[in-house]
Image (tube, rainbow, N blue to C red):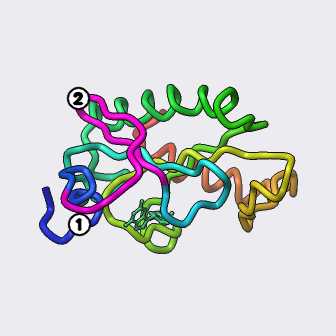
Amino acid sequence: MSSDCIFCAIVAGAAPSAPIAETESTFAFMDIRPGSDGHLLVVPKRHSTDLRDIPAEDLSAVVLESQRIAKHAFDAWGADGVNLLNCCGADAWQTVFHFHMHVIPRYRDKDKDRLRLPFEPGVRGDQELIGSLAASIRAALGEG
Ligand code: 5GP
Ligand code: ZN
């Protein structure tokens, strides 16, 4: 537990939350500023800062628990879809530095869904840049 971490406090029961589910290594609770109805967070009980330092077993447990809960969002809330989102680093919109996965139910009914991401899927990228970025990450990964 990290002493000044709000999510560690929520896991420990020292700060209030609307809890959803708990496993041996994860805790799920409702997001206090939801982007859509039912927006929730799944966190590892053990403190990690972000995607870079979370141990593999905690990351797997959080992803599997996110999937389990996401499946139920369709029946329980009538969701039409779900986004899983993780923000790693302040420049990627991370504001709480205890790893968490957002489980964001999506609805055709926009009264229930306020989420707008500044992302335009379908816009074709610069093929030369895509190729050179692929080459540099392949080199970093040690891919031949
Ligand atoms: P991030 O921007 O770090 O990916 O997301 C942090 C999320 O945590 C936000 O969606 C925010 O609404 C939520 N959050 C921040 N503080 C609290 C809190 O004290 N309780 C709950 N339930 N959610 C919180
Ligand atoms: Zn923490």
| Residue at horizontal 81 percent and vertical 60 percent from the top | 120
Q: Is mark 1 within 8 Å of ligand 2?
A: yes
Which one is in front, 114 or 89? 114
Circle 1: element type: loop
**Residue 9 screen position, x and y as percent:** 21, 60
Counting residues from the N terminus, which is met first, the one under dot 2 or under dot 1?
1
Instruction: Reply yes or no: does residue 84 show up in magenta.
Output: no
**Residue 32 screen position, x and y as percent:** 49, 63
Q: Residue 24: which disc? A: 2
Q: The residue under label 2 is which amino acid type? A: Glu
Quarter holding ligand 1: bottom left
Which one is in front, 55 or 4? 4
Q: The residue under label 1 is which amino acid type? A: Cys
Residue at numbered disc 1: 5
Residue range in magenta is 14-30
| Residue at horizontal 66 percent and vertical 44 percent from the top | 105
